[in-house]
Image (cartoon, grey):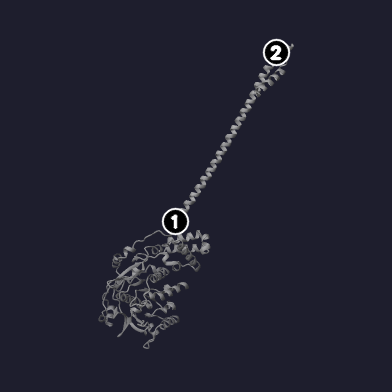
């Protein structure tokens, strides 16, 4: 709750523990073992920021934060806490808060999507679980898509682009380096595996415009609640998706420097998942984002079981800390408790390490930044009870708030616009059509050549037949002429023989007469 413009977190007797909204963009942490009260602290801070008109983002791991949208009611433990802390005099009252429900899978909230391009190769490689070399190849594929102005929106775009890079790897090698088929195959398998986990739902459009989460309603900051009960089953996707949201906030928001209150407060529950198995490059990016995003007016609160889950480089950026109980049952756990205690400015009234191990449920040690940005001395106190309902949200209320949201019409239905998949599909069809045309032209040319050969053969055959006919005719004429010549020659010879023989008193022989006749006829035929 707000008191004198500050967030009242807890009380220890008459001592009140506040968080100055002006220091909220210096980030913070809520830590403690399971069942020690982290969720209560988270809800109290979320309610207070909302009361201050600051939009809030929450990752709901267990499904019990949706009750922020419901009015609180009298419960024995709440009533006892309110009375013991004299909160009614401070203006504490039951309340409800504006909540917008989101869900990557579109089941418990409005669909929350992003595109492959917006996720980028570095974050996507974490989701895919690929190695460093394959990450480099993925970056090359993204670069090719950018250079050729092809949009990577969903997983089918990415698979089409991977296949395109593989098929044209020789042409791309000179400009982009070697693209190993084995790496392309490994990345493709990882994408297909991700699709089985619902990637076709959370990669697509309309993609989330992060500015739609920076809303207020009746003076209260809207609490954007991402239902993560299904998403948390894929820890890498959960952590990467939230990291992407932080990156989007950093890129979209203008520089504001120090301001009276943050533009938004982002709660990252189960924060250890963000750092588990993170590469050196990814850790560096996370640390850089945490350092720089404060200048955009965004406060980040990491919620985790053990402060040791948070890398030192990031822990040093967390100025506001709420530490619930930690249990030490082994030497290693005891060292972790002492390490956690050493991050606080000691209070001579108690031993911090001992206090951490003996905190009751709902009790915590707290240290926040003063107006000068200096960590205050650690204090032990009880956390205020939430003003909203304790427990899971009513499903009917959740459904009505989802469908009644002004953003529902914008994000409810997926849109599949023209992108790399469609472009490459058209390119493939055009290439196939060109291949088909070339094949048809070659077939037509071959058919024409065959037809010409057949025509030539037929013409040659016809010529040969004509030549044979002419020769046959000439031979026949010769034979007939020879026969006629012989017959006529004999007749003429006989006649001449008789005539000549008569003149000389005797007849010439038949053969001599025939020869003479043939000679005469031959001379005539030659003429």
Rendered image quadrant of residue 158: bottom left
Q: Quadrant of the C terminus?
A: top right
Q: Position of residue 44 (x, y in %)?
A: 32, 77
Tell me, yes or no, whether the two marked residues, 2 and 1, touch with CB atoms within 8 Å.
no
Q: Position of residue 107 (x, y in %)?
A: 34, 65
- Residue where numbered disc 1 is placed: 425
- Residue where numbered disc 2 is placed: 499
Judge whether residue 53 can be spotted in this image.
Answer: yes
Residue reaching furthest to the bottom: 348
Sort mark 2 into few (<14), some (14-19) or many (20+) by Cα contacts within 10 Å: some
Q: Nearer the viewer, mark 2 or mark 1?
A: 2
The residue under the point 56% across, 39% down is 456
Residue reaching furthest to the front: 527
Secondary structure of the residue carrying tag 1 is: helix
Side of 487 relative to 283 (left or right): right
Of 186 and 328, nearer the camera is 186
Q: Position of residue 92 (x, y in %)?
A: 27, 78
Of 194 and 374, nearer the camera is 374
Q: Residue 232 carries which label?
A: none
Sort mark 1 into few (<14), some (14-19) or many (20+) by Cα contacts within 10 Å: few
Q: Quadrant of the N terminus?
A: bottom left
Side of 277 relative to 225 (left or right): right
Q: Earlier along the polypeptide chain: callout 2 or callout 1?
A: 1
Q: Is residue 248 above or below residue 321?
A: above
Of 181 and 341, nearer the camera is 181
Q: Position of residue 488 (x, y in %)?
A: 66, 19
């Amino acid at each position: 709750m707000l008191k004198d413009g500050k967030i009242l977190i807890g009380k220890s007797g008459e001592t009140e523990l506040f968080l100055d909204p002006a220091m909220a963009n210096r980030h913070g942490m809520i830590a403690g073992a399971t069942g020690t009260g982290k969720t209560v602290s988270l809800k109290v801070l979320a309610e207070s920021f909302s009361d201050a008109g600051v939009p809030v983002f929450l990752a709901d791991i267990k499904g019990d934060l949706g009750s922020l949208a419901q009015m609180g009611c009298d419960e024995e433990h709440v009533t006892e806490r309110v009375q013991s802390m004299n909160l009614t005099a401070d203006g504490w009252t039951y309340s409800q808060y504006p909540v917008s429900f989101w869900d990557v899978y579109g089941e418990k909230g409005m669909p929350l999507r992003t595109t492959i391009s917006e996720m980028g190769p570095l974050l996507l490689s974490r989701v895919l679980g690929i190695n460093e070399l394959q990450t480099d190849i993925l970056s090359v594929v993204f670069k090719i898509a950018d250079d050729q102005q092809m949009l990577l929106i969903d997983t089918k775009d990415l698979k089409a682009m991977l296949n395109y890079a593989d098929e044209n790897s020789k042409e791309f090698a000179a400009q982009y380096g070697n693209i190993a088929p084995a790496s392309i195959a490994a990345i493709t398998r990882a994408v297909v595996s991700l699709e089985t986990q619902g990637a076709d739902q959370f990669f697509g459009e309309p993609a989330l415009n992060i500015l739609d989460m920076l809303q207020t309603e009746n003076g209260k900051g809207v609490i954007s609640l991402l239902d993560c009960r299904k998403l948390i089953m894929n820890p890498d996707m959960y952590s990467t998706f939230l990291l992407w949201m932080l990156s989007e906030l950093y890129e979209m928001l203008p520089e504001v420097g120090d301001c009276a209150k943050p533009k938004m407060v982002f709660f990252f529950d189960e924060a250890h998942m963000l750092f588990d198995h993170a590469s050196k490059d990814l850790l560096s990016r996370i640390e850089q984002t945490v350092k720089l995003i404060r200048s955009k007016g965004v406060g980040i609160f990491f919620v985790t079981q053990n402060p040791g889950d948070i890398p030192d480089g990031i822990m040093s950026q967390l100025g506001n800390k709420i530490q619930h109980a930690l249990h030490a049952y082994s030497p290693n756990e005891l060292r972790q408790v002492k390490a956690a205690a050493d991050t606080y400015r000691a209070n001579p009234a108690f031993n911090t390490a001992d206090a951490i191990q003996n905190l009751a449920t709902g009790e915590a040690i707290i240290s926040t930044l003063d107006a000068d940005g200096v960590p205050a001395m650690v204090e032990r106190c009880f956390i205020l009870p939430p003003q909203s309902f304790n427990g899971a949200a009513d499903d009917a209320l959740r459904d009505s708030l989802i469908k009644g949201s002004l953003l529902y019409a914008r994000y409810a239905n997926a849109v599949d616009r023209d992108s790399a998949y469609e472009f490459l599909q058209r390119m493939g069809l055009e290439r196939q059509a060109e291949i088909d045309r070339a094949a048809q032209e070659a077939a037509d040319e071959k058919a024409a050549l065959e037809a010409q050969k057949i025509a030539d053969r037929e013409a040659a055959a016809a010529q040969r037949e004509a030549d044979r006919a002419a020769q046959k005719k000439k031979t026949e004429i010769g034979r007939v002429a020879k026969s006629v010549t012989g017959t006529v020659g004999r007749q003429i010879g006989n006649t001449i023989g008789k005539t000549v023989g008569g003149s000389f008193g005797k007849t010439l022989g038949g053969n001599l007469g025939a020869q003479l006749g043939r000679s005469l006829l031959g001379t005539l035929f030659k003429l």
